[in-house]
Image: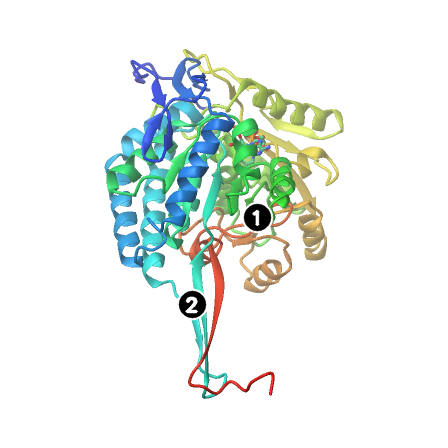
Amino acid sequence: MNVVSISEAKLPAEPFVARHLIDGDWRQSADGSTFDRVSPSHGSVVTKAAKGGARDVDAAVSAARLAFDKGRWSRTSGKERATLLLKIADLIDRERERIAYWETLESGKPISQAMAEIEGASDIWRFAASLARTMHGESYNSLGSDMLGLVLKEPVGVVSIITPWNFPFLIASQKLPFALAAGCTAVIKPSEMTPATTVILGELCIEAGIPAGVVNIVLGYGDPVGTAMTADKRVDMVTFTGSTGVGKAIVKAAAGTLKKVSLELGGKNPQVIFPDADLESAVDAVVFGVYFNAGECCNSGSRIIVHEDIAEAFLKATVDLSRKVPFGDPLDPSTKVGAIITPDHQSKIDKYVRDAADAGATVHLGGEALTVPGLAGQFYQPTIVADVKSDMPIAREEVFGPVLSVLTFKTLDEAIDLVNDADYGLSAGVWSENVHTCLEFARRAHAGTVWTNTWMDGFAELPFGGVKESGQGRELGKYGLDEFLEAKTVTMRIGKTRAPWVA
Ligand code: NDP
C-alpha cells in the first residue's frame, strides 16, 4: 500500500476560534458554552467553537426574519445581488489556501482535494450570480383582450441550511448562493465536526457587504441547534444534506409548520461494467469513485456490478491500482486519501467489512485500520470486497468509507434489476463502448444522475439530487434556484370589463 507520511506538515500554532454570526455580529453562545474539534488525521484540537442552543437559534432566526421582512435583501435588484455574489466568489478565490487548510484539518480530506473543492465553490457562486440577474417569471397574454396574467417568482423567505461534515464548504456553496440569488435570508448550521470554513464564508459575506441579518450562522449540534432551526415557525424552508435518517426526522419536524423541505441524502451508487467497456478507464474511475474523500461521499461509487466474463480481470486490475493510491497525511500535497472523520465512524466502516466477510464475501484487499507513521488520527486501508450479494448490508447501505463491494451480472436486464434493487437512488454509472447499452441504462436506472463512461463529473449548470430515499428537490443548475422561489399569480383585468356578479 502507498502510505504517505510527512514531517513538514504545518499544524496551527493556535486553534481556529469559531463564533456564531447573528445579525452581522460575531457572538459567543448565550450560555457561554463551547466545544473542541479534534483533527481526525493529527489528533490535536484544531478548532474551538461556540456551542449553540435554543436562544442562539432564536436570535439568528429573528435576525433573518427581520432582514427578510424589511426587504434588506429581497427587495434589492438582481443586479445588486449578482454584484455581491460575484464579490464573494472573488473573496473565496483570495482566501482559497486558508479555507482549504482549515477544511483539511477539520475533515481529514487531502489538501489538494480541498483546494479543488474551494475552486469549484467559487465557480458555483459565480453561476448563482448569473441566475440572480436572469431569473424571471411568466406572462400570459392569451387570456382574452381584457386580461393579463403574470407569474412572479418570489423568494421563499427565511431558509435554514443544515450541512454535513464531508464537504462543508462546497455543500454550503451549493445552497447559500442560490438562496441569496433568490432573495432569501438564511441561518446556517455546519456539522459540529467542521465549523471553521462556514465561519470563514460568513466573514467573506460580511466583507463583501451582505447586509446584517441576511446570512446568520449558528454552530453546535444537530440537537438542539438543527432541531430548533427546523421546527421554528418563522423559518419558511429547510435545506439539508446528510444522512437519510436525519432527513426523515427533518421532514417530520418540519411537518408541524408545513414548511418546504429540500433534502440531499445518501446513496449506494452502482456502476455497471459491461464486457465491451474500456477496462483501464473504468478501473481508474472506480478507484477514484470509491476512495475519493475516503469514501465519505454521498456519490461514492461503492457498488460495482461487473459482467461475470470480465470480473476476474476487473478485480485484479482494481486491486493493483488501489495499492498505488497515496493514502496518508492530508496536509501532504501528494496525498489522495486522508483520514476517517471520527474513531466511531472508523469502527462502523470496519464492522461492515467484517460482517460481509462473516456472511461469505471475500476481502481481496484491506479490511483493516491503516497506520500512518507519525500521525495520531484514524485511517482505513483501501478495501475491496467481492462475492457480495445484493441483500448484504455492505451492498445496500452507505458504508461511507474506502470500501468497494463487487457484485456480478450476466445480462443487461439482470444488471438493471440489481441497480434498481435499492432504497437509494442518487447516482448510477454505466461503462460500455456501445451507445445503445449506455442509453438504455440511462433511461432505466432509478437515479437522479447517470454517468456514462465517466464518474462524478459535476458542473454548476447541471442539477444534482436523488430519487427514492436519496432525497427530494435539486441543487445546482437553474433547478437549484427554483427550490428557493415561490410562484405568485397576478391576474389583471384591463379596462372596466368585469361583468357584475349581482345584477
Ligand atoms: P447527519 O445526517 O447526522 O448530520 C448532518 C447534519 O445534520 C449535521 O449538521 C448534524 O448536526 C445535523 N443534524 C443531526 N441531527 C439533526 C436533527 N435531528 N435535526 C436537524 N439537524 C440535525 O450525518 P452524520 O454526520 O451523523 O453522519 C452519519 C451518517 O450519515 C454517515 O455515516 C453517512 O452514512 C451519512 N452522511 C451522508 C451524507 C451525504 O452527503 N449523503 C453526509 C454526511 C453523512 P451534528 O452532526 O453537528 O450534530
Quadrant the C terminus occupies: bottom right
Q: How is the image coloured?
A: rainbow
Q: Residues within 10 Å of mark 1 (few under 14, many from 20)?
A: many
Residue 347 image position (x, y, % from top left): 61, 20
Q: Is residue 211 above or below residue 330?
A: below
Q: In terms of depth relative to the viewer, which is nearer, 220 or 110?
A: 220
* Disc assigned to residue 282: none
Q: Residues within 10 Å of mark 2 (few under 14, many from 20)?
A: few
- Which badge, 1 or 2, is on the more N-terminal residue? 2
- For the question of whether residue 15 can be seen, the reply is yes
**Does the CB distance between marks 1 and 2 fall below 8 Å?**
no
Task: Give the residue at mark 1.
Answer: 259
Give the left or right position of residue 189, taking residue 209 as reference.
right
Q: In terms of depth relative to the viewer, which is nearer, 192 or 450?
A: 192
Q: CA distance from mark 1 to mark 2?
A: 22 Å
Q: Identify the residue at image location x=60%, y=39%.
A: 250
Q: In terms of depth relative to the viewer, which is nearer, 265 or 328?
A: 265
* Disc assigned to residue 137: 2
Q: Identify the residue at image location x=39%, y=36%.
A: 216
Check disc 1 and report its element: helix, strand or loop: loop
Q: In terms of depth relative to the viewer, which is nearer, 407 or 237?
A: 237
Label 1 CB, ligand 1: below 8 Å?
Answer: no
Residue 9 image position (x, y, % from top left): 32, 18
Residue 60 image position (x, y, % from top left): 43, 35
Residue 237 image position (x, y, % from top left): 52, 47
